[in-house]
Image (tube, coloured by chain):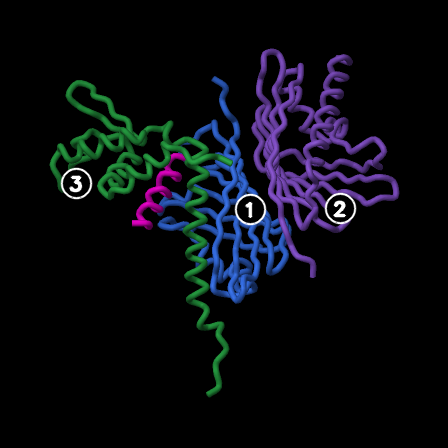
Chain colours: A blue, B purple, C green
């Protein structure tokens, strides 16, 4: 059987927020604001570096309490205030790569509200040691199910 | 202010080469080897390819038709598994305008005595600069160049 | 674009029950016998066994009997897949975008200009 080395997929999410586009954009752009909503559920953030600008690199180390093994390493590629943010990020667990993503955030006015569209194109890197995947995927699934009930 | 727009696209190219994965992979690892095949059309003016082939390393090259707009390619290496896989993010600019951002995955799979290369590109084309398949077409041409370079190398060996 | 997979739906359904979630959380730390799994749960052994059957049917858990002891473990194949990871990325964004909405509502009051009256 051929061992797959990479699988690809795209996810799309939309939201309508009762706030003007510049406030929604500011929620991404300002570190104090982003730190309030961009948090990983039940898990903790052990280390975080903000650098929101084209070419800026951000780092987030997070995971279950006592085991912040995941690292999201982000590069901002295209920022057009307040309309668009394009960034790529890699996810690793204890140094082992899990996936690399290219994310597009589009912010547009919808009457007095804002329409937000998130498109994420993902390269999932299977093979190697994926025991780490399993736990993170499972924990998030449990968390999500817990939240919806 | 012109309206902003995006178009997302994914394509996959599979190519066979008659040499083992390590030889194909080697054509990616240093600037000299890569410059033999990673080039624009013949009539384009060439500029130096810069390559720092490691996770976190960068790559850049530019070129264009004489007297015409200059195209800039800038990449960041996200993941490298020697002789197996390369994942990188890259952007294309035409002069000062960003045209697209892409995530490119290259897999090198052994196939008998040779290699099956699978390249998947997931892109976002910005503000109407989507290209109706020109990117895919151009990438196939690059693999033609790679094939020629590898054959030439095999003959010289 | 990956299609939603039936195994993923089965898994989500299996995890919709809080007892089964507790069992899966326990197994994600290490394999366990059925009696070990049952110990912290306030129910009969046969109820535990029924929950286990649902988890095995969903593909999340696998068990084998050696002698008189049935040992359960997380099924690695079920979880080590692109669909699961990509689904997890989606779930993660859903949570965060919901929280963004909460943040925008909470800070709306501060952003409103004060009315002179």
Q: Which mark is residue C104?
A: none
Q: Main secondary structure of the magenta part?
A: helix
Q: Which residue is mark 1?
A: A103
Q: Is residue A146 magenta?
A: yes
Q: Which residue is mark 3?
A: C41
* Mark pair 2, 1: CA separation: 22 Å
Q: Which residues are magenta?
A: A133-149
> Subunit of mark 2?
B
Q: Would residue A30 be visible to someone looking at this image?
A: no
Nearer the observer, B156 or A26: A26
Q: Position of residue A9 (x, y in %)?
A: 51, 37
Q: Which residue is mark 2?
A: B94
Q: Position of residue B28 (x, y in %)?
A: 68, 28
> Subunit of mark 1?
A
Q: Is residue A24 magenta?
A: no
The quarter of the rendered structure image containing the N terminus of chain B is bottom right
Q: Is residue A138 left or right of residue A80?
A: left
* Mark pair 3, 2: CA separation: 64 Å
Q: Badges 2 and 1: C-beta atoms under 8 Å apart? A: no
Q: Are marks 2 and 1 on the same chain?
A: no
Foreground mark, 3 or 2, reads: 2
Nearer the observer, B127 or A124: B127
Mark 1, secondary structure of its residue: strand
* Mark pair 1, 3: CA separation: 42 Å
Q: Are marks 3 and 2 on the same chain?
A: no
Mark 2, secondary structure of its residue: strand
Q: Are marks 1 and 3 on the same chain?
A: no
Q: Local crowd at mark 2 within 10 Å, few (<14), some, or many (≥20)?
A: some
User: What residue is drawn where x is 35% and y is 36%?
Assistant: C9
């Amino acid at each position: 059987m051929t061992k797959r080395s990479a699988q690809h997929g795209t996810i799309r999410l939309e939201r309508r927020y009762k706030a003007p586009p510049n406030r929604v954009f500011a929620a991404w752009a300002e570190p104090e604001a982003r730190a309030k909503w961009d948090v990983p559920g039940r898990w903790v953030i052990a280390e975080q570096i903000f650098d929101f600008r084209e070419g800026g690199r951000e780092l987030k180390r997070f995971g279950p309490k006592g085991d912040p093994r995941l690292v999201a390493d982000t590069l901002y590629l295209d920022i057009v205030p307040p309309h668009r943010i394009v960034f790529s990020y890699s996810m690793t667990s204890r140094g082992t790569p899990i996936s690399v993503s290219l994310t597009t955030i589009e912010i547009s006015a919808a009457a007095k509200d804002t329409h937000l569209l998130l498109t994420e194109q993902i390269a999932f890197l299977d093979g190697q040691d994926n025991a780490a995947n399993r736990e993170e995927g499972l924990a998030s699934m449990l968390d999500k199910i817990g939240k919806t009930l | 202010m012109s309206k902003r727009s995006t178009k997302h696209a994914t394509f996959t190219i599979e190519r066979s080469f008659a040499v083992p994965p390590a030889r194909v992979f080697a054509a990616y690892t240093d600037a000299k080897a890569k410059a033999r095949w990673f080039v624009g059309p013949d009539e384009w003016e060439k500029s130096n390819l810069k390559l720092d082939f490691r996770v976190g390393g960068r790559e850049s090259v530019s070129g264009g038709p004489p007297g015409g707009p200059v195209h800039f390619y800038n990449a960041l290496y996200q993941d490298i598994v020697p002789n197996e896989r390369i994942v990188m993010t890259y952007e294309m600019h035409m002069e000062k305008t960003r045209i697209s951002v892409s995530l490119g995955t290259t897999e090198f799979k052994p196939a008998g005595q040779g290699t099956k290369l699978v390249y998947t590109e997931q892109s976002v084309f910005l503000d109407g600069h989507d290209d109706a398949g020109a990117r895919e077409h151009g990438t196939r041409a690059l693999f033609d160049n790679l094939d020629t370079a590898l054959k030439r190398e095999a003959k010289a060996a | 674009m990956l299609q939603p997979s039936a195994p993923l739906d089965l898994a989500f359904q299996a995890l919709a029950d809080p007892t089964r979630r507790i069992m899966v959380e326990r197994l994600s730390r290490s394999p366990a016998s059925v009696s070990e799994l049952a110990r912290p749960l306030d129910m009969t052994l046969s109820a535990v066994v029924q929950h286990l059957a649902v988890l095995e049917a969903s593909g999340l858990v696998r068990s084998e009997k050696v002698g008189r002891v049935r040992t359960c473990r997380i099924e690695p194949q079920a979880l080590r897949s692109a669909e699961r990871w990509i689904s997890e990325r989606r779930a993660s964004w859903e949570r965060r975008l919901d929280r963004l909405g909460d943040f925008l509502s909470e800070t709306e009051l501060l952003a409103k200009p004060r009315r002179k009256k």
